[in-house]
Image (cartoon, rainbow, N blue to C red):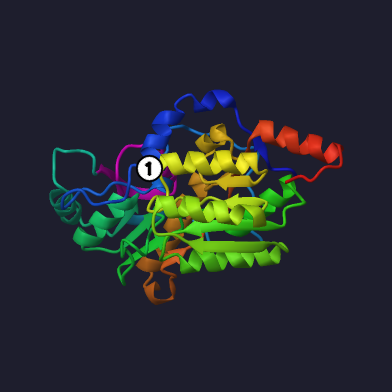
Amino acid sequence: MNYLKETQGTLFRALPLVLAMLFSGCATIGQDTAVEPVVETAEVEPPVPETTRPASPPQAVTQVPGPFGPKVAIVLSSRLPAYESVAIALGELLEDYSIYDLADKSQTPRELFTRIDEIDTDIVMAVGLRAATVAKSYAKVPVVFCQVFNVGENDLVSGQVKGVAALPPLSLQVEAWQEMNPGLQNIGAILGSGHELLIEEAHQAADSAGLTLHYRTARSDRETLYLFNRLTPDIDGFWLFPDNRVLSPAVLRQIIQYAARHRVQVAVFNPALLDLGATLSATSVDSDIAATVVSVARRVIDGDRKSIPDVTPLNEIEVQMNPALLSKIAQAAANGDDAK
């Protein structure tokens, strides 16, 4: 079944605001204020995809046997739609929970977690980078976080803190990409340091699909642009990951524009970027995020912490296409041209 969905152009009228939020940075501002990385912020609600596709075989156990009974504190970095939608999905799986917003200035993070402790909370579910970092600092009970990309750089994982992946399975992203373009052969990726597990997953996904992955490590957005320009002659696709340590709005625009001129397809992490000319976006599914968080939390409560991965993978994906580029690819195929 074809599970690619064309994007509605009218959804991206707020693109400049989205870009500003996507690249707000990941530096710490004051003791308790951390700005979220790019994967965590999305001001535009994407259209509902045609379908979601489960991984085969499953990469994580997300089947939750009945409502989760322990008392849960859901802590949000802010009330951004990307966080609230996950909180809503979590609420559908929980029996006893409260939601807390770190953007609420009526109390400090320390006071908030004192309140959480006073009501005998069993576990914290943190949504977003700031929620995860504050929860690690103040929570007296186990924490499961989600919607965080640069996990290693922020030193979030510990014996009491476990995470859920921010991105959908890379194998499903490659599968969607090849369904759209069977002629895809070489894909490039550029990330900052500290993503060895993600790159290993990317290599495995590429190898399984018969593709070659060209990977580079950058230390700044300008180096990302330089490395991308060097990669372009050797690739027909570029995997754009949400690492705002080595990306900026200006460089992102230049990459997508340069890729279009050189007929390199770009896979992105947010559907708003399709309006810049990216080829396809691959995003996670709120219900899958919630089910995975609850599955990890259940294992934590059951005393199974040692066997839980530091970051548990997701199972599903939402894919949306740039309709203009899809039309060009179809026309090129009809003419017998290279689909690059």
Image quadrant occupied by the N terminus: top right
Q: What SS does tag 1 mark?
A: loop
For residue 92, above or below residue 7: below
* Residue 314 appears in the figure: no
Q: Is residue 192 magenta?
A: no
Give 320 or 332, whichever is nearer the viewer: 332
Q: Residue at x 46, y 32 (%)?
A: 44
- Which residue carries the number 1 mark? 23
* Image location of residue 179, percent across then percent down: 73, 48
Which residue does the image show at 31% across and 63% down from the upper left?
A: 156
Q: Residues within 10 Å of mark 1 (few under 14, many from 20)?
A: many
Q: Position of 221 compared to 28: left or right?
A: right
Q: Give the residue at the far bottom of this rendering.
A: 306
In the depicted structure, whether residue 62 falls above or below residue 85: below
User: Where's residue 111, x and y in %?
Assistant: 13, 49
Q: Amino acid at mark 1?
A: Phe
| Residue 19 x/y as whole percent | 42, 36
- Apparent side of residue 290 relative to residue 301 in the rendered image (left or right): right
Identity of the residue drawn at 41% across and 50% down: 221
Q: Which residue does the image show at 59% across and 35% down from the upper left?
A: 277
Task: Specify the quadrant of the image occupied by residue 100.
Answer: top left
Highlighted range, magenta? 74-101
